[in-house]
Amino acid sequence: MVTDQKNNPLHGITLEMILNHLVNRFGWEEMGRRIRINCFNIDPGIRSSLKFLRKTPWARAKVEQLYLETLRERK
């Protein structure tokens, strides 16, 4: 069964792509200020952040929301 994803702005975008976009735009310090989680504030890195975000739905939701906000700003 294939579900239609045309209205999902995150369809085809990986968590790693989202995280790289946000880090390039804001940097780790600003990311840690906007989303207060240790993986952004204490020895931040893509790999460790991905590991945490994949296991923590509330944190992933905040990261995805910030990403969507940056997309809206560009329009």
Image (spheres, rainbow, N blue to C red):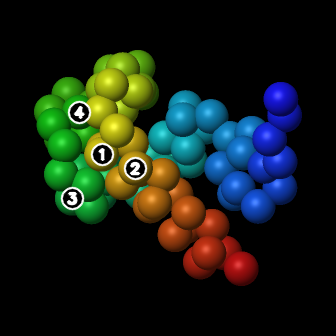
Task: Give the residue type at disc 1.
Answer: Trp
Task: Give the residue type at disc 4.
Answer: Cys
Residue shown at the point (20%, 28%) measured from the top left: 43
Label 1 to label 2: alpha-carbon separation: 5 Å
Among the two numbered marks 1 and 4 on one chain, the one whose residue lies closer to the N terminus: 4
Label 4 to label 3: alpha-carbon separation: 12 Å
Q: Secondary structure at mark 4?
A: helix
Residue 45 higher or lower than 62, as above or below:
above
Residue shown at the point (76%, 61%) measured from the top left: 7
Q: Position of residue 69 (x, y in %)?
A: 52, 69
Q: Secondary structure at mark 2?
A: helix
Asked if the residue under mark 4 is in contact with the one under mark 1, i.e. CB atoms within 8 Å, the reply is no
Among the two numbered marks 2 and 4 on one chain, the one whose residue lies closer to the N terminus: 4
Label 2 environment density (alpha carbons within 10 Å; few <14, some 14–19, many ≥20):
few
Q: Secondary structure at mark 3?
A: helix
Residue 4 higher or lower than 15, as above or below:
below
Residue shown at the point (40%, 50%) measured from the top left: 61
Q: Position of residue 49 (x, y in %)?
A: 34, 29
Label 1 environment density (alpha carbons within 10 Å; few <14, some 14–19, many ≥20):
few
Residue 34 higher or lower than 40, as above or below:
below
| Residue 3 located left or right of residue 18 | right
| Residue 16 located left or right of residue 61 | right
Label 1 to label 4: alpha-carbon separation: 14 Å
Among the two numbered marks 4 and 3 on one chain, the one whose residue lies closer to the N terminus: 3
Q: Position of residue 66 (x, y in %)?
A: 44, 61
Residue that mark 2 sits on = 61
Residue that mark 4 sits on = 39
Residue that mark 3 sits on = 33
Label 3 to label 2: alpha-carbon separation: 16 Å
Residue 3 higher or lower than 43, as above or below:
below
Asked if the residue under mark 2 is in contact with the one under mark 1, i.e. CB atoms within 8 Å, the reply is yes
Total marks placed: 4
